[in-house]
Image (cartoon, rainbow, N blue to C red):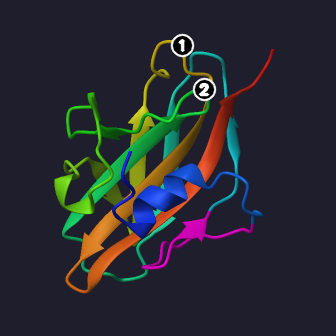
């Protein structure tokens, strides 16, 4: 895959050290890793910090492959080529100044560990962050 942007590079950079973050940035931010119940739902809350949000985006890269998928507004996943201009708009609900991304109601078939990238577009550009997510063993 030709890496066309810093966003695509972030999707491949799972070995970077973690630090807590609640906001996204134009240079990317590593968010805390999360776990979820086997077969369970996953949501993420982001502080939009008063930004004018034009669109939101959710991207998933299974730990077992180099494929990347983007989520559309209806919750369906489609392969993504790494070009930020090609991102489908996704969906997030507003709760005060926060955006709550519903990533999935159950993980895609065969995917138990993944890297999730969340992004939103403002008039100034694209802000994004990523985190690792995995099913808990119970």
Q: Residue at x 60, y 26 (%)?
A: 64
Q: Which residues are magenta?
A: 19-30
For the N terminus, the quadrant is: top left
Depth order, front residue of 110/35? 110
- Left or right? Give the position of 72 relative to 110: left
Q: Which residue is mark 1?
A: 110
The residues bearing labels 1 and 2 have C-alpha atoms spaced at a distance of 9 Å
Q: Magenta stretch containing residue 20, yes or no?
A: yes
- Please determine whether, in this image, residue 31 is positioned above or below residue 109: below
Picture coordinates of residue 85, whole percent (x, y): 19, 61
| First along the sequence among labels 1 and 2 | 2
Image quadrant of residue 102?
top left
**Residue 81 position within the rendered picture, expressed as x and y whole percent measured from the top left:** 29, 45
Total marks shown come to: 2
Left or right position of 48 against 23 = left
Quadrant in the rendering for residue 68: top left
Residue at the spot x=65%, y=17% of the render?
38
Q: Are marks 1 and 2 in contact (CB under 8 Å)?
A: yes
* Classed neighbour count for the residue bearing mark 2: other residues with Cα under 10 Å, few (<14), some (14–19), many (≥20): few
Give the quadrant of the C terminus.
top right
Q: Residue at coordinates 27% horizontally, 60% vertically from top-left?
A: 84
Instruction: Name the residue tied to disc 2.
Output: 64
Q: Is residue 83 above or below residue 70?
A: below
Magenta part mainly helix, strand or loop? loop
Disc 2 element: loop
Q: Secondary structure at mark 1?
A: loop
At 64% across and 70% down in the image, what residue appears? 21
**Relative image position of residue 34 (x, y in whole percent):** 68, 43
């Amino acid at each position: 895959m030709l890496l066309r942007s810093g966003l695509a590079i972030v999707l491949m950079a799972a070995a970077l050290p973690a630090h807590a973050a609640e906001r996204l940035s134009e240079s990317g931010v590593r968010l805390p890793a999360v776990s979820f119940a086997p077969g369970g739902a996953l949501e993420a809350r982001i502080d939009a910090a008063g930004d004018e949000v034009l669109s939101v985006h959710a991207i998933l890269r299974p730990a077992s492959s180099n494929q990347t998928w983007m989520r559309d507004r209806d919750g369906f996943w489609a392969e993504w080529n790494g070009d930020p201009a090609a991102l489908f708009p996704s969906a997030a609900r507003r709760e005060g100044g926060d955006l709550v991304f519903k990533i999935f109601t159950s993980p895609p078939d065969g995917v138990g560990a993944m890297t999730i990238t969340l992004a939103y577009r403002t008039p100034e550009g694209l802000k994004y962050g990523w985190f690792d997510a995995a099913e808990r063993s119970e």
